[in-house]
Image (cartoon, rainbow, N blue to C red):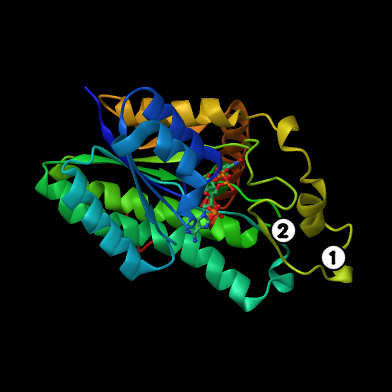
Amino acid sequence: MAKTWFITGTSSGFGRHLSELLLERGDRVAATLRNPSRLDALAEKYGDRLWVRELDVTDTAAMRRVVDEAFADLGRIDVIISNAGYGLLGAAEELRDDQIDRQLATNLVAPIQLARAVTPHLRAQGGGRFLQVSSMGGHLTFPGFSMYHTSKWGVEGFFDSFAKEVAPFGILTTLIEPGVIGTDFFEPGGSSDIAPAMEIYAGSPAAWFREGVTDPKAMPGDPIRTAQAMIDVGDAENPPNRQLLGSDAYVAIRDAMAERMRVFESGLDLARTADRDGAS
Ligand SMILES: NC(=O)c1ccc[n+]([C@@H]2O[C@H](COP(=O)([O-])OP(=O)(O)OC[C@H]3O[C@@H](n4cnc5c(N)ncnc54)[C@H](OP(=O)(O)O)[C@@H]3O)[C@@H](O)[C@H]2O)c1
């Protein structure tokens, strides 16, 4: 049976591919984006199966209004995909204050507020799915990308806890954790924001990421296949609470986690010295 999906950030990348794939298979899509005219061709092709509203996800009041309107207009919404987000490149010292604020507002606060806005509606309809697009960068870090990692690690923590709060209401959440996928995210002049460079960081670990990001077509992950895999998660009878997408994500996270465990274990003797006598 056809489903209804609510998606943020549908102008390009995963959000756009998700919308196209879902409409093509006959589902209904509530697409939100900053510049609705970017979906004009899809609106013409799919008519009222595509519901479109302008939404900058950093505007929490507008997000609540659009969410309420979507449920009022469409009735049941089966799957929410919180996808809007972008990268911020630069060493912590290089970043401007407003760049930090916007990164956290978009990638961290907005997903939290979206989850809060849809919860009463999903609860009222007896449940639903929430897919949060996180990243392999929510489990590991690269130098020169600290604020992006802060946002995605934050999202990982929020949804890990939120999932347990809303599961009793039939609301199932999944953190989607892609590896490196060739969307506009990495396109030179694409969606990522770049801090003004300080000479002192040239050639240092903080610079290699900004200097190394070049051709999206050379990246290991395929954007359309990634979007299709997200749809498969949204369709799954028992969706996982986390889903990696891309073999690179699996290898990099496996290695990063093994290294963290190695560090914890090497400090175990000292950790135990903080125990009260007789504590197990
Ligand atoms: N590509 C990867 O390798 C990769 C890996 C892991 C995770 N991700 C995550 O995947 C998600 C989608 O990224 P993508 O790769 O598809 O890149 P993308 O093609 O650049 O798409 C990003 C989307 O987010 C939207 N957006 C950004 N700020 C917004 C705001 N304030 N309000 C509403 N929409 C906003 C953009 O809209 P505008 O057109 O208006 O800017 C665009 O539609 C992001 O959360 C990203 O962190 C990507």
Is 127 displayed left or right of 136 in the figure? left
Residue for point 89% across, 69% down = 199
SS under mark 1: helix
Q: What residue type is labelled 2?
A: Gly
- If the image is split into quadrants, where does the N terminus sit? top left
Judging by the rendered image, the residue that carries numbered circle 2 is 144
Q: What residue type is labelled 1?
A: Tyr
Instruction: Give above or below for 1 relative to 178.
Output: above
Observer-nearest residue: 254 or 216? 216
User: Do callouts 2 and 1 mark residues in contact (Cβ within 8 Å)?
Assistant: yes
Q: Position of residue 148 (x, y in %)?
A: 59, 57
Q: Can the viewer see residue 50 in this picture?
A: yes
Q: Where is residue 172 in the image (x, y as percent from the top left)?
A: 25, 39
Instruction: Give above or below for 267 relative to 75.
Output: below
Is 199 displayed left or right of 172 in the figure? right
How far apart in space, not on screen, are marks 2 and 1 (Cα)?
A: 10 Å
Residue for point 25% across, 51% down = 70
Q: Is mark 2 within 8 Å of ligand 1?
A: no
Observer-nearest residue: 278 or 141? 141
Number of other residues with Cα within 10 Å of mark 2, as a class: few under 14, some 14 to 19, many 20 or more: many
Judging by the rendered image, the residue that carries numbered circle 1 is 201
Residue for point 33% across, 66% down = 62
SS under mark 2: loop
Instruction: Give above or below for 218 relative to 114.
Output: above
Residue for point 57% across, 32% down = 223
Counting residues from the start of the chain, the first of labels 2 and 1 encountered is: 2
Number of other residues with Cα within 10 Å of mark 1, as a class: few under 14, some 14 to 19, many 20 or more: some
Q: Does the residue labelled 1 lie within 8 Å of ligand 1?
A: no
Q: Residue furthest front?
A: 44
Q: Position of residue 189 (x, y in %)?
A: 73, 53
Q: Residue furthest bottom?
A: 97
Observer-nearest residue: 219 or 253? 219
